[in-house]
Amino acid sequence: MPTQQWWKEAVVYQIYPRSFNDSNGDGIGDIQGIIEKLDYLKELGVDVIWLSPVYKSPNDDNGYDISDYKNIMDEFGTMDDWEEMLAQMHNRGIKLIMDLVVNHSSDEHEWFKESRKSKANPYRDYYIWRPGKNGAEPNNWEATFGGSVWEYDEQSDEYFLHLFSKKQPDLNWENPKLREEVYDMMKFWLDKGIDGFRMDVINFISKVDGLPDGEKVEGKKYVSGHQYFMNGPRIHEFLQEMNEKVLSQYNVMTVGEMPGVSPEEGKLYTGEERKELNMVFQFEHMDLDTQPGKNKWHLKPLDLRDLKKSLGKWQSELEDGGWNSLYWNNHDQPRIVSRWGNDKEYRVTSAKMLATCLHMMKGTPYIYQGEELGMTNIKFDSIEDYKDIETRNMYTERVIENGENPHDIMESIYTKGRDNARTPVQWNASEHAGFTTGTPWIKVNENFKEINAEKAMAEEDSIFHYYRKLIHLRKQHEVIVYGSFEMLYNDHAEIFAYTRTLGDETLLVVTNFSGNNHTFDSSKDLNNAELLICNYDTAEKESHSFHLRPWEARVYSI
């Protein structure tokens, strides 16, 4: 059996504070708003809260551009509020992991203000500065939010690197002084009593020497330079140093957000003997409804066989020594019930099915705020109602600059835009869904009278109570946490089924990713099998088979 650890047995709940709960009526979620809802999260049964950034920030990228790592954003409250929140979480037996955003800072951080003063400034080398090349940028890389990764600074006649927004200059991890500053900041929060970190794009911190040009693409001025900064040459060295100097001194959990990571690399990052991280967020399954070789806005329908192949591969590759994080949703992804479920007539059933499929796999499950209510994607009529920098930049580039059809672009935004996840949590059926007494910073989804927490808690068969049961089952059955994984029905286009086995207990997990009826034939004898959970009221079976209804999920203990 794998080594037992508290973070393997935990269920994590992500709070995106701006959209969670507003306590003071300014339309923006805040720390006191989180404190107000801790009993709700205790009732849900989660063990850990991952809190998206609450540090001081000018909010160019909603807090992922940090101007002071040791202070709290005014909109969210004060350090006293934060300390009260941590104490209140710990009083309820809930742990807290904070976001660690150290690939880049804000351009309003004191380090960067100093850095841009002159080439001789002691902070110059905290960032990545380069002279231009032939009167243009130092290389041809494209930034995540569009345009060049380089911004020209007149004062010193050089360019600085920003893989994201131009207000998010990349930190220079080659500089040992910068690394010590980061470790000092991590200890500052750990000494306050937090229980770990979720690390933002942490596999981007090591760049290839010389920052060479990306492969040219006809008709494109800027191209991907991913191979030169994803999983770079010193990444494992940096993470091992971070572990040795900081993480190993505390009993904490760590999860690294890692776009472009493979299972082989995932094993290196999460292997216990390697002393780097506990788990990674990989994105392979999140790209399966994107056209091959294109960015996320170029849509294609999901082929379930691709999903099974991808998730199955990660399950088997990290079976020994590594560890998976399990998620469908976060602040950067659309709502799963709208994406791969049916958010109309089968919203409740398909949301429960998707939860079952995920929570019974091997790894630590993450729930994103509102997922436990079956919150859906949003369709704003106008681009003006969208707040996300990535969405707005893409619209500007493709519609306003390139003259593409706005209707087609809006369809992509409805499907994949990050604001799908960022509309306020729907607490009740009152105005603005009970999120605020003021005007919300982003509009509330109009379906809040039908979909809200108050209603879900009152209804026995709601998605909320189904999540409670899934979390409770995890506490009762070690096999859910530590059992081995085996995929069944590999080639079936609509059934996702697998077993989990530990000692003499086997779980059979069968889920139907469609609105069609199917028959499931089992090699296992189901006569004495116990039905642990099902998203329909009744579940009849034969000795080796049963009938699957639309979006049905069943878990048997055999």
Image (cartoon, rainbow, N blue to C red):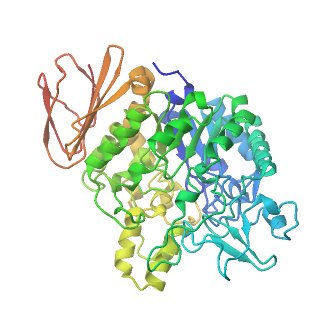
Q: Quadrant of residue 504?
A: top left
110 w.r.t. 504: above or below: below
Residue 38 appears anywhere in the view: no
Give the left or right position of residue 413, taking residue 389 as reference: left
Q: Residue at x 61, y 61 (%)?
A: 62
Q: Residue at x 61, y 71 (%)?
A: 139
Residue 507 appears anywhere in the view: yes
* Foreground of the two, 246 or 417: 246
- Looking at the figure, which quarter contains the N terminus? top left
510 w.r.t. 437: above or below: above
Q: Position of residue 445 (x, y in %)?
A: 43, 62
* Foreground of the two, 154 or 264: 264
Give the left or right position of residue 365, taking residue 553 as reference: right
Q: Position of residue 172 (x, y in %)?
A: 72, 57
Q: Position of residue 23 (x, y in %)?
A: 63, 53
Give the left or right position of residue 470, taking residue 182 as reference: left
- Number of numbered markers: 0
375 w.r.t. 556: above or below: below
